[in-house]
Amino acid sequence: MPLFFLILAALYLIGNGYIYLRSWEILHTFPLIWKWIFSVGYWAGTFSFFYIFGHRVLPDFNPLLHTLYYIGTGWLIFTLYMVLFLLSTDLLRVFNICFNHRFITCFILAILLLTGGYIHYSHPKKEVINLDINKEITEKKQIRVAAISDIHLGYGTTKERLQQYVRMIQAEKPDLILISGDLIDSNLKPVREQHLEQELNQLQAPLGVFMIPGNHEYISGIGKSRTFIQQQTSIQWLQDSVVTLANGIQLIGRDDQHNPRRKSIAQLTDTLSSNRPLFLLDHQPYQLDESAQANIDLQFSGHTHNGQVWPLNLITGHLFEVSHGYKQKGNTHIYVSSGLSLWGPPFRIGTRSEMVIFDINFQYTILRMKVFIQSIVAQLLLNPYIYWRGHQALPRQKKWQVTYFLLFLFEICLYLFGFFFRKDLPDSVFIPIMNICNTWYIGSIYITLGLLCLEVIRISQRKWKWLPGIIARHWEKNKRILFALFLAGTGILLYKAHLHVTHPIVKHLYIDLPKGSSSRDSLKIVMVSDTHFGEVIGKQQAQNLVRLSNEQQPDLVVFVGDILDYESRFAENDHIEEDMQQLIAPLGVYTIYGNHEYRANRFAKERWIRKFSTLLKDSVASPDSSFYLIGRDDFIHKQRLPLHQLLAGLDTTKPLIVLDHQPWSFAEMRMNHIDLGLHGHTHNGQLWPYPLLMKLIYECPYGYYSKGGTQHYVSSGFGCAGPAYRVGTHSELIVLHIRFV
């Protein structure tokens, strides 16, 4: 750092010497006294720059020192542009392009440029960023965050300027205020002497005001800066620490890079919940990939000033992956601010001072909402009808009617309890409630279908009198029996439907691929899709999967997407990866993304999947030399690579096996002469009559399909989505016996 300032000072003096020499183009005609006055004034202005190196030891803050600070820093930028303009005119003279009064012209241009730069600095803009974060909070779904950086309080940014900033921030009525370092410049003395804590204490937000140290807090003395903020202001200081806000947002404040022992992002997030929003304040915007890997939802940084003045912004653009503005990496939103104020010269040329406003929309946890949104259909549409018909069928005795009413009341109360307290209930309580509501939701559908069949019988009997007399004469009694049979039948149906999930079938499929192989003539693949490990499908199913797979003695195991449901924590808490690591396959275990891998904590899911398998995400693997295994990113990712790009450079005389979660790409596979495509996603509808609907949506919603030389298999899945029931379908594990011919 001292070397940098020595070089800067040397270049500064050389530049001023060059300007002074060029000034004699117009001064040589002036009297000697004016030459002396100009020379003294010019060099006084030049050397005022060196005040910024010594102001820490100079007398107490006063307006004169503030003016001297501005003159010194401003002269630096004046020197920069005067040198650039004068050098440009010198270059033009080489090409015999000359004009009169070039020094005066360059001087006027420099002054105009600095004036515009001062206006840009004095009138910060408001940058509004709208974000959607698919995480749950406990209060309102939308919050407004005012995020600022690099105010540099001291000799440059004084009390009047800070008052302007405070009014600007508070006018937005933010829910949360974040300060990403360099609040204090290089000396705490002028901050104390101007009593700037008075203005800082006017910063108010319901969720709090938080800051982290930047490099300038270290320059001014990190201990003194921390003490001042903690004791004199209401701002909460974060330094390699984490705080959970009232609405559940987890705010991480990193120490500055000046501290070589600062914690990594992984260390700071190690004990945090991936299901709650993660906000990160990190002054210097380095190692952005680390934030994405840690599943950070929003990172706010500063430090760069976006170069502050042209052409320095070209340099910062080269030094930083993001030197200014917004960028998304995976599910991580990153914003690097140019700063609300600035350091040194009071100019913004080619940049703007800014305050960033984040208007953030949060989504409540999808699964916990989904179950109750589905159930409310039964509550509002189906339950009244079922209750009405049941009430008519039951005996008139009070004990039957009261018991029947209490059962419906209990179910409604349980539903309402789960709905309103879904965010607060522990999993051990919520999951049983969810299962009960799911069961009743599915059961009510089939009870209603049965009752509607009775309605058809009843209405048709009125017109055609087709029922036997004994049934018609005792209709009231018989309908009671039929209602009871419907209830019992639905119970049996749901029991079998649950067994269809918990007891998957093993299905063997024999396939010939018309491409020979020099190293092998056959291949056995265990194909698994849509396990949906999570709240419903857990460790027992995982152990069952491993047992069934290992019994087949496969060469290769492939997971065709949707391995995890909405959240990874259930699989992590049950250590299901330890069971999956017991899969035996000489050629390895491979996995691709499904659409559910993109929901909630995507990067946590990726880390978990990599613990037991090789993840293929728009990539190609050669488990051995006899064939290629191509894993596509999910269809939900609009930037996934086209198939022909993945095939570039491959030996297409070898068998090509493609894993693609959603069965939409049949035509693309045929065009690229793929031999075998393996898919999932559809669940074969999971619950009748949805299988009928699947046939209208997909070219092949389930099973084996061949067209144009490409063979496909679409699996109904090993697990399930939502309720743990399958009606008219079956969970399955597929064993592919492939011959290379």
Image: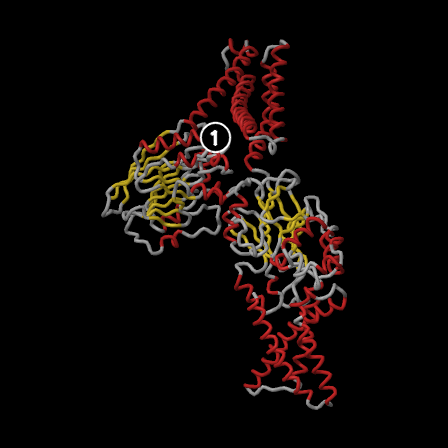
Q: Position of residue 544 (x, y in %)?
A: 39, 29
**In the image, is 258 to the left or to the right of 498?**
right
Residue 579: give x, y in percent of width and height. Answer: 40, 34
In this rendering, is residue 52 above or below 172?
below
Residue 582 in the figure: left or right of residue 165: left
Q: How many residues crowd mark 1 within 10 Å: few (<14), some (14–19), many (20+)?
A: few
Taking 546 as reference, is 228 left or right? right
Quadrant of residue 99 within the rendered picture? bottom right
What residue is rendered at 63% in x and 77% in y?
A: 82
Task: Examine the image and state in which quarter residue 342 appears.
Answer: bottom right
Vertical relation: 640 (above or below) 561: below
Whether residue 120 is visible here, answered yes or no, is no
> Where is 251 relative to 58, above or below?
above
* In-front residue for pair 629/708: 629
Point out the image quarter for the C terminus.
Answer: top left
Residue at point 52%, 52% (across, down): 329
Location of residue 226 with respect to 244 vertically, above or below: below
Q: Position of residue 225 (x, y in %)?
A: 66, 54
x and y percent of residue 368 in the render? 56, 34
Q: Is residue 187 left or right of residue 517?
A: right
Nearest the eye: 660 or 550: 550
Q: Quadrant of the N terminus?
A: bottom right
Image quarter of residue 738:
top left
In depth, the one of 579 and 626 nearer the eye is: 579
Name the element at disc 1: loop
Q: Who's the residue at 69% across and 52% down the image?
A: 228
Which residue has dot 1 on it? 689
Residue 457 visible in this rendered orientation of the protein: yes
Q: Amino acid at mark 1?
A: Pro
